[in-house]
Image (tube, grey):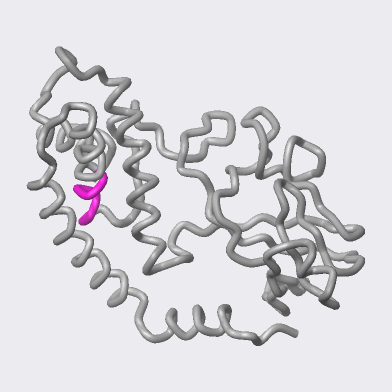
Amino acid sequence: MNVGQVTTLFRNYIDEPDESFVSDATVQVSLAVAYEEFRHTVMQYDPQKYETSVSITVSGTTYDLGEGASAVSILGTDANLTHPRLIKLNNIASISASGAITRVWRSYGSIQALQRATDGYTLQNATLHFASTVAATLKVYYVPDAAYNAALSSGIDWSTAATYIDDLAPFHDMIALYAAQQYSVLDGASAEPQQLLLGQREVKLMEYLNFRQGPANQYVQRVLDEDCYA
């Protein structure tokens, strides 16, 4: 499904086929929020589904990812972003000259924990902190924001009907259902039918993602999650 089809389905669910009571602008905001919820559901079963990566060259014990302070900015205001905004940091890895991962760095939850470590990193606000001095190019694997950013040609433009969303088209009705649930809060109407259908669709989505991943992808995820760092 594309943006136009999801928009039509959402308007059908809320029984507002035109702008008489619900403007297109309201629909676009509702769908944008609903898509973030959809992506969150997907990532519960496939954490790498929306993952992207960017290379950073580190020289020292910190790297600022925000506000144009470094060559790569993925946090901070839109005007200073060099790549799509970071929503979730998945991994940081060392890479070879050919681009192969040679080491996955250990993540720590705080600077205090990092201070007791000999290597690894933590993200505090917009700054990556490393346990010791680093002089290398690292690959940052992260989930980007789905919000539309025209300057970076990233995210989903919910104002353009032909816009491609992602390759989970068989489940894009869930975006309209999430949006309909949100609308029901404003409208004061019962959302029980949408909730029942959405629950069924979430089960189908989980089954599909588990089937599509297969044992190979599940093994890769286990390896990344285990204590197997160099």
| Residue 163: percent from left, percent from top | 34, 37
Specify the quadrant that holds the C terminus. Answer: bottom right
> Would you say the magenta stretch is mainly helix, strand or loop?
helix
**Snapshot quadrant of residue 228:** bottom right
What count of labels does the image hold? Answer: 0
> Is 67 above or below relative to 224?
above
Which residue is drawn at the image coordinates 35% and 51% (left, top)?
Answer: 166
**Position of residue 24 in the picture relative to residue 124 (left or right):** left
| Residue 145: percent from left, percent from top | 51, 44
**Residue found farthest to the top:** 20
Specify the quadrant that holds the N terminus. Answer: top left
> Is 35 above or below relative to 118?
above
Is residue 58 inside the magenta stretch? no
Q: Nearer the viewer, residue 196 or 219?
A: 196
**Position of residue 175 in the picture relative to residue 117 (left or right):** left
**Snapshot quadrant of residue 138:** bottom right
> Is 176 above or below relative to 103?
above
| Residue 75: percent from left, percent from top | 66, 42
**Position of residue 2 in the picture relative to residue 88 (left or right):** left
Q: Nearer the viewer, residue 87 or 93?
A: 87
Which residue is drawn at the image coordinates 43% and 84% (left, top)?
Answer: 216
Q: What stretch is highlighted in magenta?
A: 170-175
